[in-house]
Structure formats: structure tokens, C-alpha cells
Image (spheres, helix red, strand yellow):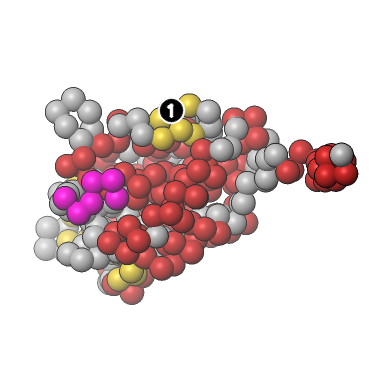
């Protein structure tokens, strides 16, 4: 009886938090995993992932994924906009790593995970906000949902485990620094000459296919920008080295050419 009384007192003292701990908005576990297993290259403009090392840390990754899946929709809806977006970006990236690890090392590209009928991004293999989901459901159904966030910079934050994709950041996204992190990812990606650059010989702006696939997102009105041309004009200093070429981009009259996308797995071993 004495033990039973002690248990009852403990439950009353701890309250509902004992049954359901608050979500860790610092994303500490994911942050530590990224810090250990993401290799930053090209002066911070690109990164590769140590998937073989990630495999050894699978238990920690599973704990983090379980914490994401445990969040209920009502709890999520009560968070700030920045908390919701940071949560979704981290979830997309973490579940992408998990999908790769489920098939590693036998793949050369994340597209090898899919088949003729179901792409890697349409495979339902996790639960989020109370529903069984695939990666496309996070990116297109939640992050890109019109009116939810309307921020094209998310395309520089979500990582598709490919060389052509904007780098997987070496730290977790957090609400308190989210705007600065997204801006930094934008600078990193646009400064990478292998994926975005001005060609002075052809006098064309060569950019990632991301700007072709998601054109409408760069017309959403963020910071008053309503077209890709305006977006590139705003970031002309990142896309070219000479003042003359930057001025040409800033004019908004430079033709745009989309570069071939590299779907090679962003594995540090390669």
C-alpha cells in the first residue's frame, strides 16, 4: 500500500508531463548527428554525408524519428510558424537519411530506392502528425501548401540526398534562428558555381533545375519578389564575380538556362 501511495503522489506531482514530454525544439539529437556525420565542402557551399557512420548511430536517429512521429497534430498546430517550419524541414531531412540508410550501401542514387510505379518520394514508410506519410507529403503537402509558409528558401534547406541538391546543413534548423539559417542556405547555394553561375561567353545565367521545377514558389511575393528574374537580380552579387556581369543579372534581362541535375548520392565515400 505504501508503494502504491508513493506512485500516486508521483503521478499527481509530475502531472501530464510524465505521460507526454514536450517536444525538444532545439532538435538536439538531430543536431548532434548532423555535426558528426555531415562533411562541409567548398568553403561551406556544399556538403557530403557519412552514411556509413550514420549507420553506426542508427539508434540515436531512430530515437529522433520517434520523437517526430510522437507529435500530435493539435500540439503542432499550437506552435509558432517558425517552430512548425523548422520541425517539417528537419523531419524531411531526417526521414530522407533514414530512407537512404534502409537501402545503403547498395544504391548509387536515392532514385534507386523507387521503382516503375512508386518513386522514393512516394514511399510511405513513416508516421507524422498522426498519418502515414511519404516524403512528398511533407514537402508538397505541408511545407509548400499555399498559405502555410510561402517561402521559396525552403528549397535550399530540404535535402534530397543528391549532389545536385542544396547541401544538407551541418546543424538542425531551429525556430529561434530559422530566418538567418534559411538566408545563409540561400547564399551558400547561389554562390556555388557548379550549380548556379553567369556564363560570360554565352551571356546567359545558368542555374539549378530547382528554379525550373518550382518557378511558382519564386513568384510568391517574399520580400516583394514576384519572379525568378527579380530573385536573381536581388542576389546578383552571388551569381557572378565581375561588376559588369552582376549588373547584367540585376537588369533582369539575362536569358536563363537550367543545368542538368546530378542525382548521384551525396555520400562522403564517393
Q: Judging from the image, what secondary structure is the residue with disc 1 in?
A: strand
Whether residue 193 appears in magenta in the rendering, the answer is no
Count of all numbered marks drawn on residues in the image: 1
Q: Vertical placement of 39 versus 168: above or below? A: below
- x 74%, y 43%: residue: 17
x and y percent of residue 147 in the render? 53, 30
Q: Position of residue 228 (x, y in %)?
A: 34, 44
Q: Nearer the viewer, residue 189 or 62?
A: 62
Residue name at image x 53 percent, y 48 percent:
86
* Residue at image coords 52%, 58%: 29
Name the quadrant of the C terminus: bottom left
Above or below for 260 versus 113: below
- In the displayed image of the protein, which residue is found farthest to the left? 201
- Residue 230 visible (yes or no): no
Pick whichever, 63 or 226, lies toward us: 63
Q: Main secondary structure of the magenta part?
A: loop
Residue 10, image quadrant: top right
Residue on which disc 1 sits: 132
Q: Quadrant of residue 199?
A: bottom left
Q: Quadrant of the N terminus?
A: top right
Residue 122 spot, x, y in % from top left: 30, 31
Q: Which residues are magenta?
A: 101-106
192 to 233, vertically: above or below: below
Q: Is residue 58 left or right of residue 160?
A: right
Q: Position of residue 185 (x, y in %)?
A: 42, 59
Can the viewer see residue 93? yes
Please tell me in which quadrant of the rendered image residue 57 appears: bottom left
Amino acid at each position: 500500500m505504501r508503494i502504491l501511495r508513493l506512485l500516486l503522489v508521483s503521478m499527481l506531482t509530475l502531472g501530464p508531463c510524465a505521460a507526454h514530454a514536450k517536444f525538444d525544439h532545439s532538435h538536439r539529437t538531430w543536431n548532434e548527428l548532423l555535426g558528426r556525420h555531415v562533411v562541409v565542402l567548398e568553403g561551406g557551399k556544399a556538403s557530403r554525408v557519412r552514411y556509413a557512420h550514420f549507420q553506426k548511430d542508427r539508434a540515436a536517429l531512430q530515437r529522433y524519428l520517434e520523437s517526430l512521429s510522437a507529435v500530435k497534430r493539435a500540439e503542432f498546430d499550437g506552435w509558432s510558424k517558425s517552430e512548425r517550419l523548422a520541425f517539417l524541414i528537419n523531419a524531411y531531412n531526417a526521414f530522407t537519411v533514414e530512407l537512404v540508410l534502409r537501402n545503403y550501401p547498395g544504391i548509387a542514387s536515392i532514385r534507386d530506392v523507387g521503382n516503375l510505379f512508386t518513386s522514393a518520394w512516394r514511399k510511405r514508410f513513416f508516421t507524422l502528425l498522426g498519418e502515414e506519410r511519404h516524403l512528398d507529403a511533407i514537402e508538397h503537402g505541408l511545407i509548400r501548401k499555399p498559405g502555410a509558409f510561402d517561402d521559396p528558401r525552403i528549397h535550399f534547406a530540404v535535402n534530397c540526398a543528391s549532389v545536385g541538391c542544396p547541401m544538407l546543413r551541418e546543424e538542425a534548423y531551429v525556430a529561434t534562428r530559422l530566418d538567418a539559417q534559411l538566408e545563409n542556405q540561400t547564399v551558400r547555394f547561389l554562390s556555388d558555381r557548379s550549380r548556379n553561375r553567369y556564363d560570360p561567353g554565352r551571356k546567359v545565367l545558368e542555374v539549378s533545375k530547382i528554379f525550373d521545377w518550382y518557378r511558382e514558389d519564386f513568384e510568391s511575393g517574399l520580400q516583394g519578389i514576384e519572379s525568378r528574374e527579380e530573385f536573381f537580380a536581388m542576389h546578383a552579387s552571388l551569381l557572378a564575380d565581375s561588376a559588369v556581369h552582376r549588373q547584367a543579372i540585376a537588369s533582369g534581362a539575362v536569358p536563363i538556362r537550367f543545368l542538368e541535375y546530378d542525382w548521384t548520392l551525396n555520400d562522403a565515400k564517393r
